[in-house]
Image: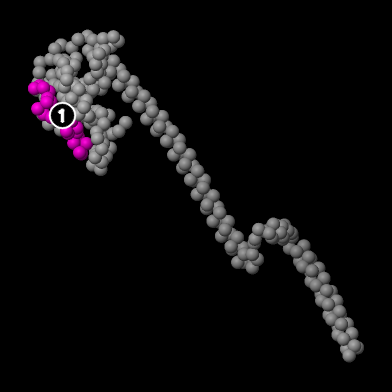
Amino acid sequence: MTDCWQLKEIRENMSTPWTAHEVTQLLRERYSGREWAFVTEVPNGTGMDMTRRCDGLAMSLWPSKGLYLHGHEIKVRRGDWLTEMQDVSKSAAFSQYCHYWWIVAPLGVVKLEELPGDWGLMCPTASGGLRAKKPAALTTPMPPSHSLVAGIFRACCKASTSEVEITAARDSGYSAGYSEARKFYAESVEQSTDNRRCENLKRSVENFETASGIHIDAYKGRQLGELVRIVQSAAPDQIRYWLDRVAVDLAKTHERVVEASNTLGRMAEEKR
């Protein structure tokens, strides 16, 4: 459903023809609030008694301002209006029961001189409202027939059902949106936590590399980890023992290297 504030925004930026649906929305806005009851697509009867429909009936509800029934016929094309004018008696199915009878049409569809004497004309404005170009005259209506009352009740029940469906859809949408928002929030918190953990881990690796002078990459990270685990799990005496053995082995290796170097030196002298 298009809200009237959306119609105002649209009509301030577009010059497209008005649709019957848009005009109906303007009538809903005009007759909104506790002062009015408004119903659309009202049949003049039920079953086989239904021969015509009224685009909109509005009933004023405050006795202090008068209890009046306003009938509305929407015309958005001039051709439809000219067809209507060929037999204005068709409107009597509703107009005879209304205090006021209105034609609601965009500018240019209806000429004022074409209107029957008692009928009024309302036109949509560019800002998204309705303006009376000719006020409807107050008439003394006929008492409503039981067939018309049945038709009004039928339209009211249909409108009430629509409102219930709209409310249910709104509540369902709210519930779904709330669930999605909670899910998004939880995922955002988890992602934020993971990001903080990654940043902390990155800083730890950088600190280790700076202190040890060893660069950790994907190939020797496991090896370095095993060495660190061995060092951390061993007792100080064991580490010292291993280091002493390494020192002894290195000293022996050094002696052998020196001896080999000396031998090569002597062999070179002999060849000379």
Circle 1: residue type: Val
Q: Nearer the viewer, residue 244 or 214?
A: 214
Q: Could you classify mark 1 by the number of other residues whose Cα lies within 10 Å: few (under 14), some (14-19), or many (20 or more)? A: many
- Image check: 40 left or right of 119? right
User: Which quadrant of the rendered structure holds the N terminus?
Assistant: top left
Q: Residue at x 21, y 21 (%)?
A: 57
Residue range in magenta is 105-129
Counting from the top left corner in percent of width and height, residue 251 is at 81, 75
> Against 68, is 147 above or below?
above
Residue 58 appears in the rendering: no
Residue most extreme to the right: 270
Q: Which residue shows up at 56% across the image and 54% down it? A: 198
Report which quarter residue 115 is drawn in.
top left
Q: In the rendered structure, does residue 113 fall within the stretch colored magenta?
A: yes
At 46% from the left and 42% from the top, the residue drawn is: 185
Q: In the picture, which quadrant includes the C terminus?
A: bottom right
Residue situated furthest bottom in the rendering: 272
Q: Which residue is mark 1?
A: 110
Q: Quadrant of residue 167?
A: top left
| Picture coordinates of residue 87, whole percent (x, y) | 17, 18
Closest to the observer: 12 or 207?
12
Q: Is residue 182 magenta?
A: no
Q: Main secondary structure of the magenta part?
A: loop
Q: What element does badge 1 sit on?
A: loop
Q: Is residue 77 left or right of residue 66?
A: right
| Location of residue 53 in the rendering, given as x and y in whole percent from the top left corner | 24, 18
Q: Quadrant of residue 200?
A: bottom right
The vertical placement of 116 against 223, above or below, is: above
Q: Nearer the viewer, residue 234 or 50?
A: 50
Total numbered labels: 1
